Image (cartoon, rainbow, N blue to C red):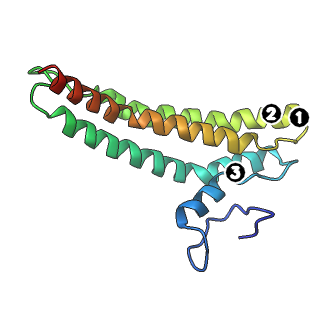
């Protein structure tokens, strides 16, 4: 992979010095060229949507499983009480993808206002969105850990 210009192709594992995770991060947050068309802005974002959903969804699934295990600790829930709102499990991915789409929508508007000089706005917005989404996905596990700790400290 050329260090001066990051391409929009997925990184290959063969012969690379950096780990696959570092290569993926470089690709995800690569600075696109200035002067891009609306279509190229949208394609930059959409080329990364699957990886975003896979990573955030995977973290969310693991967090939900850990949360359910933690909430099964005796004394955490009262009889008949649900550990999680079932609709939240279905609505969260939809809301995250709407927010993801807002990323390219905002960059297209920025591109128009600044005559194609988008700089690093796309990668920065994607990174902030990733961090926010991952923290949101880890929230159930955090709540579960706090619940278990407070239960045990209350005895």
Circle 1 residues within 10 Å: few <14, some 14–19, many ≥20: few
Relative image position of residue 25 (x, y in whole percent): 60, 56
Q: Name the residue carrying label 3.
A: 43
Viewer-proximal residue, 70 or 100?
Answer: 70
Camera-near label (3 vs 1) is 1
Residue 114's label in the rendered image is 1
Viewer-proximal residue, 18 or 10?
Answer: 18
Relative image position of residue 72 (x, y in whole percent): 14, 34
Contact (CB < 8 A) between labels 1 and 2?
A: yes
The image quarter in which residue 116 lies:
top right
Quarter of the image containing the C terminus? top left
Question: In this rendering, would 83 be left or right of 116?
Answer: left
Q: Earlier in the sequence, mark 3 or mark 1?
A: 3
Relative image position of residue 10 (x, y in whole percent): 62, 65
* Residue 70 vertical position relative to residue 84 in the rendered view, above or below: below
Viewer-proximal residue, 25 or 101?
Answer: 25
**Mark pair 2, 3: CA separation:** 16 Å
Q: Name the residue carrying label 2.
A: 110
């Amino acid at each position: 992979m050329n260090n001066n210009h990051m391409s929009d192709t997925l990184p290959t594992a063969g012969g690379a010095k950096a780990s696959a995770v570092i290569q993926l991060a470089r690709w995800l947050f690569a600075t696109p060229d200035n002067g891009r068309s609306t279509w190229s802005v949208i394609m930059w974002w959409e080329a990364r949507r699957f990886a975003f959903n896979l990573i955030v969804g995977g973290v969310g699934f693991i967090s939900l499983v850990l949360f359910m295990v933690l909430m099964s600790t005796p004394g955490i829930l009262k009889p008949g009480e649900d550990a999680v709102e079932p609709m939240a499990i279905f609505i969260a991915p939809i809301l995250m993808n709407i927010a993801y789409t807002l990323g390219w929508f905002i960059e297209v508007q920025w591109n128009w206002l600044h005559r194609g000089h988008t700089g690093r706005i796309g990668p920065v917005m994607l990174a902030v969105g990733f961090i926010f989404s991952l923290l949101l996905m880890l929230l159930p596990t955090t709540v579960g850990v706090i619940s278990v700790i407070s239960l045990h400290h209350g005895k």
